[in-house]
Amino acid sequence: MEKQFVANLQVGDAVHSYFIVTEKTLLPFNQPNRAGERYLRLQLADASGSMRAVIWEKAEEMAEIFSVGDVIRVRGEVTNFRGLQLTVYSLELVPEAEIERSHLQKTASLNQEELLRRLQALYRQITDPYLQKLLQSFYADDVFLKRYLEAPAARSVHHNYVGGLVEHSLEVAALCQEFAKIHPGLDSSLLICGALLHDVGKIEEYEMKGLSIELTTRGKLLGHIIIGVEMINEHISQIDGFPEKLQLELNHMILSHHGQKEWGSPEVPRTFAAFALFHADLVSARLNQFALAVEKGAKADGWTEWNRLLERDIYLGLAE
């Protein structure tokens, strides 16, 4: 049976295909005539994107069949309710042997060998000997490096795929390098190191369960920013003579890279390097969100579906 991809689905399409379950919630009906009953709200995904799905009938019975992270084959119809939504009529678990992982799991545009080559090229541009030793202490650990190259940068917001963490970190580093060219007062070595390590805690914050990205217990309780500072300080403690001032500035960059406290930063950027890192991180994330929205394509009128993260729809009708 040919795979139907989320990105190609349109209102009115009959669907008989498999997807990975990334969210699953039983909710009560609002209608008085269905008081005491619940419906099932899902988020289904494949390598091309994700979409909402609902099960109105026998929801509690169907909810027992599968868990978040499972791959299910569904029969249903695409409707329009604040964007595309799949109404599911029936479903079944898909045996692992029948799953084509490339259909379901998006990966970075560059393979691991190229990602590693670019990391090494950036490492060679760092001139500060202590920052060199710090990065080397991470990259010399084969277990860490494997996890770093495979990790996603998020569950859903941006770069949410295998290799997404390194892809995002490389983008942030490239932007930081450009900032340093424009503003000579910025320390290029410090910015590159901060860019490559700013999200390092995400290898402990997220884990791959089956084909889905889930938060770990440490991720839920601490978050990647605190975990990342802990990891960096642990490595610094093994480097003789690492300057306290340099450690303080690097810690501040990590702690403030979300830019605002309401966005999850324990502190706002208060150094030139931290301020530059925050904006590089934000630009990389936002452009990736935009690119992922554009990849889904436009409707007949040239506009994409409404994107809740970007808070807009996108006009693609100008392209020839």
Image: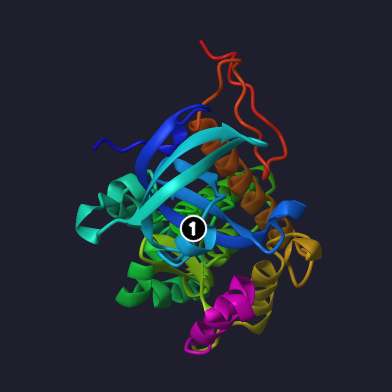
Q: Is residue 115 visible?
A: yes
The residue lying toward the viewer, choosing from 211 and 120, is 211
**Tag 1: amino acid:** Thr
User: What colouring style does the render use?
Assistant: rainbow
Judge left or right: residue 190 versus residue 89: right
Residue 4 locus on image (x, y percent) = 36, 36
Residue 24 locus on image (x, y percent) = 54, 60
Q: Quadrant of residue 190?
A: bottom right
Q: Is residue 122 magenta?
A: no
Q: Quadrant of residue 142?
A: bottom left
Q: Residue at x 79, y 66 (%)?
A: 261
Image quadrant holding the N terminus, namely top left
Judge left or right: residue 182 versus residue 14: right
Q: Residue at x 52, y 39 (%)?
A: 292
Furthest-top residue in this view = 320
Tell me if mark 1 has few (under 14), some (14-19) or many (20+) residues whose alpha carbon lies within 10 angstroms of its own.
many
Q: Quadrant of residue 258?
A: bottom right
Judge left or right: residue 69 versus residue 53: left
Residue 280 locus on image (x, y percent) = 64, 50
Q: Is residue 224 magenta?
A: yes
Q: Secondary structure at mark 1?
A: strand
Residue 141 locus on image (x, y percent) = 34, 77
Question: Magenta stretch: dominant SS?
Answer: helix
Q: Is residue 249 above or below residue 52?
A: below
Furthest-left residue in this view = 97
Q: Which residue is mark 1?
A: 22
Q: Residue at x 38, y 43 (%)?
A: 109
The residue segment tinted magenta is 217-239
Furthest-front residue in this view = 33
The residue lying toward the viewer, choosing from 122 and 264, is 264
Judge left or right: residue 286 versus residue 295: right
The residue lying toward the viewer, choosing from 97 and 91, is 91
